[in-house]
């Protein structure tokens, strides 16, 4: 996945630092009330005054940039607290204001360059990593997803525990869609709007054509082969839409043997019962089969392809955020 600019803050910070411009990372570490940006949001500021990202949607950016420039000058980290007024909050689309706490770290002087480089490398390789800062001693550490902060990776939740701030760097979300049908045409756009990188798989080239899915990433390999090629991890959701066991079943079996956080399959209750029988015959256990969401999507009475796609995206979101 090619990350959008607003999600490349660590990469840009490292580039600016190595180019000799200087770089300070500002990170939202706590919020109260209707804060404009969630915990983990970042802004990077160079010594030349360049900036990318946001910690407040514009409410206090100017003050944070000034503090970042001062941090670059003296090499010291800073903890900043800002109250966002109701008037300022309304200007960025919120009904009322709140309070945000921001950590500012000059790269090299406070945040070690090698730690930032390790974060960037992990992000490139789709490896989950946690960056922790003790806000009293200023000691820093990195840990993997099976380390001391493993509970935060599943919920993708950065935050403060006592005096320790933990920033979670998870791989980008992906949605693998098997079957280039009408529902898929609506689903790929919704997925991208929700921050997912969609991959469409359909060996039937007439279905998975550029004309029907302009600009989308399409694989014409057999589903299990395509999924094996990209690797299905815990940041991946899988949806099968073909109604054809020859195409759906290899994808389902691959997904059930993977760490994907969601597997949804189109089809009626009767269709799913037949699917279950085939999976049992293939050696899958009842607990493994129970991971399948079928019929796929939340029961919102969806009728049209777009409404069904909406129900699917809603269920994926529910499992990701509440599962």
Image (cartoon, grey):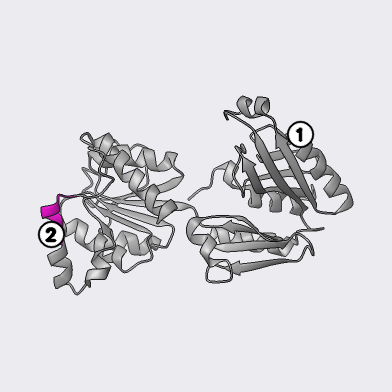
How far from the left and from the top, in percent, is residue 280?
16, 70
Question: Mark on residue 62?
Answer: 1
Residue beneath the point at 68% across and 42% down: 100
Does residue 269 show up magenta in the picture? Answer: yes
Query: In terms of depth relative to the viewer, which is nearer, 110 or 156?
Result: 156
- Residue 244 visible somewhere in the drawing: yes
Pointers 2 and 1 in contact (CB under 8 A)? no
Question: Mark on residue 296?
Answer: none
Q: Quadrant of residue 82?
A: top right
How far from the left and from the top, in percent, is residue 321?
44, 51
Residue beneath the point at 72% across and 35% down: 60
Report helix, strand or loop for mark 2.
helix
| Main secondary-structure element of the magenta-colored stretch | helix
How far from the left and from the top, in percent, is residue 53?
64, 41
Does residue 293 show up magenta in the picture? Answer: no
Residue beneath the point at 38% across and 59% down: 261
Q: Which comes sooner in the sequence, label 2 or label 1? A: 1
Instruction: Residue under label 2, please give it.
Output: 273
Q: Residues within 10 Å of mark 2 (few under 14, many from 20)?
A: few
Report helix, strand or loop for mark 1.
helix
Residue beneath the point at 14% across and 66% down: 278
Query: In terms of depth relative to the viewer, which is nearer, 153 or 171?
Result: 153
Check the image and report above or below for 74 versus 89: below
Distance between mark 2 and mark 1 Cα atoms: 59 Å
How far from the left and from the top, in percent, is residue 40?
62, 50
Q: Quadrant of residue 59?
A: top right
Query: In terms of depth relative to the viewer, which is nearer, 135 or 128?
Result: 135
Please state the extent of the stretch shown in magenta in the rendering. 267-275
Check the image and report above or below for 254 versus 157: below
Pick the quarter of the image with the C terminus. Answer: bottom left
């Amino acid at each position: 996945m090619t990350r959008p600019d607003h999600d490349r803050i660590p990469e840009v910070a490292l580039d600016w630092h190595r180019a000799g411009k200087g770089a300070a990372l500002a990170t939202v570490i706590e919020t109260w009330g209707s804060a404009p940006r969630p915990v983990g949001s970042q802004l990077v500021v160079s010594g030349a005054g360049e900036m990318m990202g946001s910690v407040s949607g514009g409410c206090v950016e100017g003050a944070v940039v000034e503090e970042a420039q001062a941090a670059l000058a003296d090499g010291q980290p800073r903890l900043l607290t800002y109250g966002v007024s109701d008037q300022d909050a309304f200007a960025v689309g919120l009904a009322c204001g709140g309070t945000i706490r921001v950590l500012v770290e000059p790269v090299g002087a406070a945040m070690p360059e090698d730690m930032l480089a390790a974060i960037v490398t992990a992000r490139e390789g789709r490896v989950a990593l946690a960056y922790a800062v003790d806000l009293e001693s200023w000691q820093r550490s990195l840990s993997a997803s099976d380390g001391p902060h493993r509970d935060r990776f599943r919920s993708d939740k950065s935050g403060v525990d006592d005096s320790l701030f933990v920033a979670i760097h998870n791989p980008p979300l992906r949605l693998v869609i098997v079957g280039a049908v009408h529902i898929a045409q609506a689903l790929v756009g919704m997925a991208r709007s929700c921050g997912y990188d969609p991959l469409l798989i359909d060996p039937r080239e007439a279905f998975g054509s550029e004309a029907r899915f302009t600009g989308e990433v399409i694989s014409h390999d057999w589903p299990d082969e395509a999924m094996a090629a990209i690797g299905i991890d815990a940041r991946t959701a899988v949806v099968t839409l073909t109604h054809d066991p020859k195409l759906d079943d290899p994808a389902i079996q691959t997904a059930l043997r993977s760490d994907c956080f969601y597997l949804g399959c189109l089809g009626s209750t009767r269709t799913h019962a037949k699917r279950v029988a085939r999976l049992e015959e293939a050696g899958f256990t009842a607990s493994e089969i129970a991971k399948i969401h079928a019929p796929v999507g939340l029961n919102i009475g969806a009728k049209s392809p777009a409404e069904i796609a909406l129900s699917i995206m809603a269920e994926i979101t529910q499992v990701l955020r509440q599962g």
